[in-house]
Image (cartoon, rainbow, N blue to C red):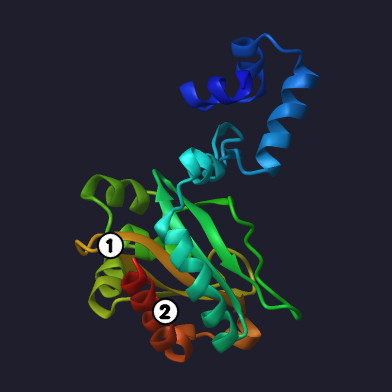
Amino acid sequence: MAVLHAVADDPCGLAELCNRTGLPRATAHRLAVGLEVHRLLRRGPDGRWRPGPALAELAGGAVDPLLDAASAILPKLRDITGESVQLYRRDGMQRLCIATAEPPSGLRDTVPVGSALPMNAGSAAKVLAAWADPATQRAVLAEAVFGERTLMEVRRRGWAQSVAERESGVASVSAPVRDSNGNVIAAISVSGPIDRMGRRPGARWAADLLAAAEALQNRL
Protein backbone atom coordinates (compact mmCIF):
# COMPACT_ATOMS: atom_id res chain seq x y z
CA MET A 1 0.00 0.00 0.00
CA ALA A 2 2.89 2.36 0.72
CA VAL A 3 4.18 1.79 -2.81
CA LEU A 4 0.75 2.39 -4.36
CA HIS A 5 0.25 5.60 -2.41
CA ALA A 6 3.75 6.84 -3.25
CA VAL A 7 3.23 6.32 -6.97
CA ALA A 8 -0.28 7.79 -6.89
CA ASP A 9 1.13 11.08 -5.59
CA ASP A 10 3.41 11.43 -8.61
CA PRO A 11 5.06 8.98 -11.06
CA CYS A 12 8.47 7.95 -9.78
CA GLY A 13 11.50 5.81 -10.45
CA LEU A 14 13.15 3.42 -8.04
CA ALA A 15 15.28 5.99 -6.20
CA GLU A 16 12.27 8.27 -5.67
CA LEU A 17 10.17 5.32 -4.58
CA CYS A 18 12.73 4.37 -1.94
CA ASN A 19 12.82 7.95 -0.64
CA ARG A 20 9.03 8.21 -0.43
CA THR A 21 8.44 4.83 1.23
CA GLY A 22 11.62 4.38 3.26
CA LEU A 23 11.89 0.85 1.89
CA PRO A 24 15.23 -0.77 1.00
CA ARG A 25 16.03 -0.63 -2.70
CA ALA A 26 15.64 -4.37 -3.30
CA THR A 27 12.31 -4.50 -1.44
CA ALA A 28 10.87 -1.47 -3.22
CA HIS A 29 11.89 -2.89 -6.60
CA ARG A 30 10.42 -6.33 -5.85
CA LEU A 31 7.09 -4.88 -4.70
CA ALA A 32 6.81 -2.43 -7.61
CA VAL A 33 7.59 -5.09 -10.21
CA GLY A 34 5.07 -7.44 -8.61
CA LEU A 35 2.38 -4.75 -8.75
CA GLU A 36 3.34 -4.05 -12.35
CA VAL A 37 2.88 -7.71 -13.30
CA HIS A 38 -0.67 -7.52 -11.95
CA ARG A 39 -1.29 -4.20 -13.79
CA LEU A 40 -1.74 -2.28 -10.52
CA LEU A 41 1.26 -0.22 -11.59
CA ARG A 42 2.54 0.49 -15.08
CA ARG A 43 5.88 1.81 -16.25
CA GLY A 44 6.14 4.48 -18.94
CA PRO A 45 8.91 4.96 -21.51
CA ASP A 46 10.71 7.15 -18.95
CA GLY A 47 10.99 4.11 -16.67
CA ARG A 48 8.86 5.68 -13.95
CA TRP A 49 5.98 3.83 -12.30
CA ARG A 50 2.47 5.23 -12.19
CA PRO A 51 -0.98 3.80 -11.29
CA GLY A 52 -2.01 0.94 -13.56
CA PRO A 53 -5.32 0.18 -15.31
CA ALA A 54 -6.26 -2.65 -12.92
CA LEU A 55 -6.82 -0.12 -10.13
CA ALA A 56 -9.73 1.44 -12.00
CA GLU A 57 -11.11 -1.98 -12.88
CA LEU A 58 -11.06 -3.05 -9.23
CA ALA A 59 -12.47 0.17 -7.78
CA GLY A 60 -15.77 -0.70 -6.12
CA GLY A 61 -16.09 -3.71 -8.38
CA ALA A 62 -16.88 -1.31 -11.20
CA VAL A 63 -16.65 -2.61 -14.75
CA ASP A 64 -15.21 -0.33 -17.42
CA PRO A 65 -17.93 -0.28 -20.10
CA LEU A 66 -15.34 0.09 -22.86
CA LEU A 67 -13.44 -2.99 -21.67
CA ASP A 68 -16.72 -4.87 -21.28
CA ALA A 69 -17.64 -4.02 -24.89
CA ALA A 70 -14.14 -4.89 -26.09
CA SER A 71 -14.37 -8.39 -24.62
CA ALA A 72 -17.20 -9.13 -27.05
CA ILE A 73 -16.01 -7.24 -30.14
CA LEU A 74 -12.23 -7.72 -30.30
CA PRO A 75 -12.31 -11.54 -30.57
CA LYS A 76 -14.74 -11.29 -33.49
CA LEU A 77 -12.44 -8.89 -35.34
CA ARG A 78 -9.48 -11.18 -34.62
CA ASP A 79 -11.37 -14.12 -36.11
CA ILE A 80 -12.29 -12.13 -39.23
CA THR A 81 -8.77 -10.85 -39.87
CA GLY A 82 -6.68 -13.64 -38.39
CA GLU A 83 -4.41 -10.92 -36.99
CA SER A 84 -3.69 -9.32 -33.61
CA VAL A 85 -6.27 -6.80 -32.41
CA GLN A 86 -5.68 -4.07 -29.82
CA LEU A 87 -7.61 -1.29 -28.13
CA TYR A 88 -5.71 1.85 -27.10
CA ARG A 89 -6.50 4.85 -24.93
CA ARG A 90 -4.44 8.04 -24.90
CA ASP A 91 -2.75 8.98 -21.62
CA GLY A 92 -0.97 12.29 -22.13
CA MET A 93 1.81 11.70 -24.64
CA GLN A 94 1.43 7.93 -24.54
CA ARG A 95 -1.09 5.42 -25.76
CA LEU A 96 -2.00 2.58 -23.46
CA CYS A 97 -3.01 -0.86 -24.66
CA ILE A 98 -6.11 -1.66 -22.59
CA ALA A 99 -7.40 -4.79 -24.35
CA THR A 100 -6.18 -7.32 -26.91
CA ALA A 101 -7.27 -10.38 -28.84
CA GLU A 102 -4.50 -12.56 -30.24
CA PRO A 103 -4.72 -15.34 -32.84
CA PRO A 104 -4.00 -18.74 -31.31
CA SER A 105 -1.00 -19.52 -33.49
CA GLY A 106 1.31 -18.18 -36.18
CA LEU A 107 3.47 -15.05 -36.31
CA ARG A 108 1.78 -12.31 -34.27
CA ASP A 109 2.29 -8.67 -33.32
CA THR A 110 1.79 -9.09 -29.59
CA VAL A 111 1.26 -5.93 -27.53
CA PRO A 112 0.66 -6.87 -23.87
CA VAL A 113 -2.23 -5.22 -22.04
CA GLY A 114 -0.85 -2.34 -20.00
CA SER A 115 1.88 -1.49 -22.52
CA ALA A 116 2.57 2.23 -22.84
CA LEU A 117 3.66 3.18 -26.36
CA PRO A 118 4.73 6.61 -27.63
CA MET A 119 2.43 8.75 -29.75
CA ASN A 120 5.06 9.47 -32.40
CA ALA A 121 4.41 6.50 -34.72
CA GLY A 122 1.82 3.88 -35.62
CA SER A 123 -1.73 3.95 -36.90
CA ALA A 124 -3.33 4.09 -33.43
CA ALA A 125 -1.16 7.08 -32.55
CA LYS A 126 -2.37 8.85 -35.69
CA VAL A 127 -6.01 8.21 -34.81
CA LEU A 128 -5.66 9.40 -31.22
CA ALA A 129 -3.66 12.45 -32.31
CA ALA A 130 -6.05 13.34 -35.14
CA TRP A 131 -8.90 13.99 -32.69
CA ALA A 132 -6.83 15.26 -29.76
CA ASP A 133 -6.89 18.84 -28.52
CA PRO A 134 -4.68 21.35 -30.42
CA ALA A 135 -2.01 21.51 -27.70
CA THR A 136 -1.61 17.73 -27.67
CA GLN A 137 -1.50 17.64 -31.47
CA ARG A 138 1.31 20.19 -31.54
CA ALA A 139 3.28 18.24 -28.95
CA VAL A 140 2.81 14.96 -30.84
CA LEU A 141 3.72 16.44 -34.22
CA ALA A 142 6.93 17.88 -32.78
CA GLU A 143 8.23 14.32 -32.31
CA ALA A 144 6.17 12.27 -34.79
CA VAL A 145 7.25 10.59 -38.01
CA PHE A 146 4.00 11.89 -39.55
CA GLY A 147 2.77 15.43 -40.11
CA GLU A 148 -0.36 17.58 -40.03
CA ARG A 149 -1.36 16.54 -43.56
CA THR A 150 -1.44 12.93 -42.39
CA LEU A 151 -3.78 13.82 -39.52
CA MET A 152 -6.04 15.74 -41.90
CA GLU A 153 -6.23 12.66 -44.12
CA VAL A 154 -7.03 10.46 -41.13
CA ARG A 155 -9.91 12.74 -40.13
CA ARG A 156 -11.17 12.82 -43.73
CA ARG A 157 -11.32 9.06 -44.33
CA GLY A 158 -11.95 7.97 -40.73
CA TRP A 159 -9.04 5.54 -40.28
CA ALA A 160 -5.24 5.41 -40.30
CA GLN A 161 -2.61 2.94 -41.44
CA SER A 162 1.10 2.46 -40.87
CA VAL A 163 3.81 0.27 -42.36
CA ALA A 164 7.04 -0.39 -40.41
CA GLU A 165 6.60 2.79 -38.33
CA ARG A 166 6.36 1.50 -34.77
CA GLU A 167 8.29 -1.70 -35.43
CA SER A 168 10.16 -3.04 -38.44
CA GLY A 169 8.18 -5.64 -40.36
CA VAL A 170 4.83 -4.70 -38.79
CA ALA A 171 1.84 -3.04 -40.47
CA SER A 172 -1.36 -1.85 -38.84
CA VAL A 173 -4.64 -0.08 -39.45
CA SER A 174 -6.69 1.75 -36.78
CA ALA A 175 -10.05 3.48 -36.39
CA PRO A 176 -11.53 5.78 -33.74
CA VAL A 177 -14.01 4.64 -31.10
CA ARG A 178 -16.44 7.34 -29.97
CA ASP A 179 -18.66 7.83 -26.95
CA SER A 180 -22.32 8.82 -27.05
CA ASN A 181 -21.34 12.48 -27.51
CA GLY A 182 -19.17 11.75 -30.53
CA ASN A 183 -15.86 12.22 -28.69
CA VAL A 184 -13.01 9.90 -29.66
CA ILE A 185 -12.16 7.89 -26.54
CA ALA A 186 -10.03 5.08 -27.98
CA ALA A 187 -8.50 3.56 -31.10
CA ILE A 188 -9.11 0.00 -32.24
CA SER A 189 -6.31 -1.58 -34.27
CA VAL A 190 -5.46 -4.60 -36.36
CA SER A 191 -1.74 -5.33 -36.68
CA GLY A 192 0.47 -8.05 -38.07
CA PRO A 193 3.43 -8.89 -40.30
CA ILE A 194 3.74 -6.83 -43.46
CA ASP A 195 3.99 -10.07 -45.43
CA ARG A 196 0.36 -10.79 -44.51
CA MET A 197 -1.06 -7.29 -43.94
CA GLY A 198 0.50 -5.82 -47.09
CA ARG A 199 1.76 -2.29 -47.61
CA ARG A 200 -1.78 -0.93 -47.86
CA PRO A 201 -3.41 -2.59 -44.84
CA GLY A 202 -6.27 -0.10 -44.88
CA ALA A 203 -7.41 -1.31 -48.29
CA ARG A 204 -7.73 -4.80 -46.86
CA TRP A 205 -9.11 -4.31 -43.36
CA ALA A 206 -10.49 -0.75 -42.96
CA ALA A 207 -14.10 -1.76 -43.67
CA ASP A 208 -14.06 -4.55 -41.07
CA LEU A 209 -12.27 -2.30 -38.60
CA LEU A 210 -14.83 0.49 -38.99
CA ALA A 211 -17.63 -2.03 -38.49
CA ALA A 212 -15.96 -3.22 -35.27
CA ALA A 213 -15.57 0.38 -34.07
CA GLU A 214 -19.26 0.99 -34.72
CA ALA A 215 -20.16 -2.19 -32.85
CA LEU A 216 -18.11 -1.01 -29.87
CA GLN A 217 -19.90 2.33 -29.93
CA ASN A 218 -23.30 0.64 -30.10
CA ARG A 219 -22.50 -1.52 -27.06
CA LEU A 220 -21.40 1.59 -25.16
- Checking the image for residue 179, the label placed there is 1
The quarter of the image holding the C terminus is bottom left
Q: Locate residue 28, reporting x and y percent.
A: 72, 21
Residue pictured at 77% horizontal, 28% vertical: 30
Q: Residue furthest front?
A: 61
Residue pictured at 39% horizontal, 43% vertical: 92
Q: Locate residue 184, reporting x and y percent.
A: 29, 61
Q: Residue furthest right?
A: 26
* Label 2 CA crowd tier, 10 Å (few <14, some 14–19, many 20+): many
SS type, badge 2: helix
Q: How many marks?
A: 2
Of the residues shown, which amino acid type is indicated by label 1?
A: Asp
Q: Nearer the viewer, residue 22 or 164?
A: 22
The quarter of the image holding the N terminus is top right
Specify whether 134 is left or right of 35.
left
Which image quadrant for residue 3? top right
Q: Nearer the viewer, residue 36 or 142?
A: 36
Q: Nearer the viewer, residue 152 or 50?
A: 50
Does residue 146 show up?
no
- Relative to 82, say whether 180 is above or below: above
Residue pictured at 73% horizontal, 35% vertical: 34
Q: Nearer the viewer, residue 72 or 86?
A: 72
Q: Locate residue 135, reporting x and y percent.
A: 25, 45
SS type, badge 1: loop
* Label 1 CA crowd tier, 10 Å (few <14, some 14–19, many 20+): some
Q: Locate residue 85, reporting x and y percent.
A: 55, 72
Of the residues shown, which amino acid type is indicated by label 2?
A: Ala
- Checking the image for residue 212, the label placed there is 2
- Relative to 23, say whether 12 is above or below: below
